[in-house]
Amino acid sequence: MTTELTHYINGEHVKGTSGRFADVFNPATGEIQAKVPLASTAEVEAAVKIAAEVQPAWAAVNPQRRARVLMKFVDLLNRDMDKLAEALSREHGKTIPDAKGDVQRGLEVVEYCIGAPHLLKGEYTDSAGRGIDMYSMRQALGVTVGITPFNFPAMIPMWMFAPAIACGNSFILKPSERDPSVPLMLAELLEEAGLPKGVIQVVNGDKESVDALLYDPIVQSIGFVGSTPIAEYIYGTGCAQGKRVQCFGGAKNHMIIMPDADLDQAADALVGAGYGAAGERCMAISVAVPVGDETADRLIEKLIPRIDALKVGPYTAGNDVDYGPVVTSAAKQNILGLVQTGVDQGAELVVDGRDFSLQGYEEGFFVGPHLFDHVTPDMDIYKKEIFGPVLSTVRAKTYEDAIGLAMDHEYGNGTAIFTRDGDTARDFANRINIGMVGINVPIPVPLAYHTFGGWKKSVFGDLNQHGPDAFKFYTRTKTVTSRWPSGIKEGGEFSIPLMD
Ligand code: NAD
């Protein structure tokens, strides 16, 4: 039986009234398991109105008390970890350990935001002029919005709403329509933790609801994570409406393997970073760049048995699975279509996962692992983000060719270098025009107290996600210059002061 999901408005689960719904699949079986309502402009406007009404009172709660709500929320996330991970895997398809990682990496940002009282402290200049003091404070923006992708349905919403709420904003989450259940559960848990009704709301929807949020004059800021074309659209439209906007887009992450690297370590890293979560990570490695033909030949030799040994299956198989299905049948067709262009354009398909099928799960959206060799920069599989279990090998003659390749690509989210030479690693970290760099670390996702963000077409906006940047994004600075007329120190007062 398909469940009808809801919105979460003013502390209540509310049925959709637009009459429009999207199917939510179980990617492992291909079955439709729920219908998610797609909000109309009127439904969005109603949520925004509530968010605006409750926000001033929330901003007036002192930062320490706001942080205590987040403290309690962390406890509840840990209490419900298994339940959240199961719901997440059922709609997304990722393995249970990976789903727990999705919750955990969000939870760590919530923990960081518990430091809000410290992070929100302003600046003060004593005696900026004679008898004049000057101080700056960070104040909440008001109604803030997050629009999130399918691939991290717990982590990315938390990266946005935790700092937004800690700063005293109200927050409207528009999660991906592919896997909306966990975001709804997170909103419930926040209220169980003591967040007043309406401070967090979840509006499910598609382009109509996104556009309603973009054009609503009450909305002060938009955070977006998703594909680059939509990031570009939301950034342009939101900025033109005078909102504060940050958008994080797609990726094509290169891993450079130097001839001196430990190739067993590099091959293990590539298999985890290339095929983990079926390649549906913005920090997945999708391009391997061995330097020199000998390095390339040896690397491919080491990769093939590791890829052949990968276990692909449903999350219900527990720890016995390395990665699960991709999110939809359309995603699967897109991946297989791109694999075909790779073959047609002359790349060598060394591991061919096209015929992959899993007994009992024939209708699931599983994609077998693929490895290409001799990929060149003009090919579609190199230029486009595939977002599937497909690793492309581009052979570079020299280190300069390898770094140049990564620098010339339009995306700049993450990258890695595997080498034993400190000088090469240091040069790479200094020169590369990419936001997150790993040295012998394949997926260099910064921890909560640093900031996360790419460069080039992987980002639109100035400030990164989480870390200190989030507290800048979700607040405005106000600077007060104050001078007081002479007071009591000028002489004693003998009558009761009348405060008029
Ligand atoms: P997507 O762009 O299709 O969707 C993201 C969000 O935008 C969803 O909430 C969706 O409902 C909404 N949306 C989709 N089409 C829209 C339209 N025409 N107008 C307005 N809103 C629209 O992305 P996805 O497939 O859910 O996620 C995968 C993408 O996200 C990949 O490109 C991946 O690299 C990227 N991603 C980037 C980061 C990062 O930090 N840079 C992190 C995770 C994912």
Image: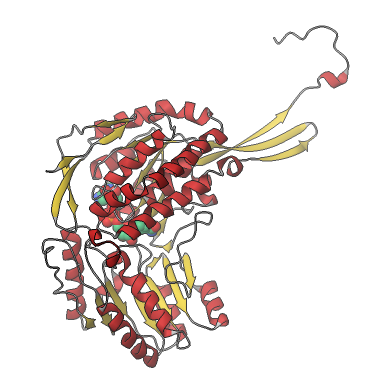
The quarter of the picture where residue 50 lies is top left
Q: Is residue 259 left or right of residue 286?
A: right
Query: How many numbered badges does the structure rendering display?
Result: 0
Which residue is most to the right? 491
**Quarter of the image where the N terminus is located:** top left
Residue 417 visible in the displayed image: yes
Q: Is residue 320 left or right of residue 414?
A: left
Q: For ligand 1, which image quadrant applies?
A: bottom left
Q: Find residue 462 and report its horizontal and vertical position in percent.
A: 48, 53
- Seen at 31% across and 47% down, the residue is 83
- Seen at 28% across and 83% down, the residue is 305
- Seen at 50% across and 54% down, the residue is 448
Q: Find residue 399 and report its horizontal and vertical position in percent.
A: 46, 84
Q: Find residue 143 and report its horizontal and vertical position in percent.
A: 42, 35
Instruction: Identify which residue, 229 or 357, lies in the foreground.
Output: 357
Q: Find residue 148 and report its horizontal and vertical position in percent.
A: 33, 49
**Quarter of the image where the C terminus is located:** top right
Q: Is residue 396 left or right of residue 474?
A: left
Which residue is most to the bottom? 294
Residue 227 visible in the displayed image: no
Instruction: Identify which residue, 52 or 323, lies in the foreground.
Output: 323
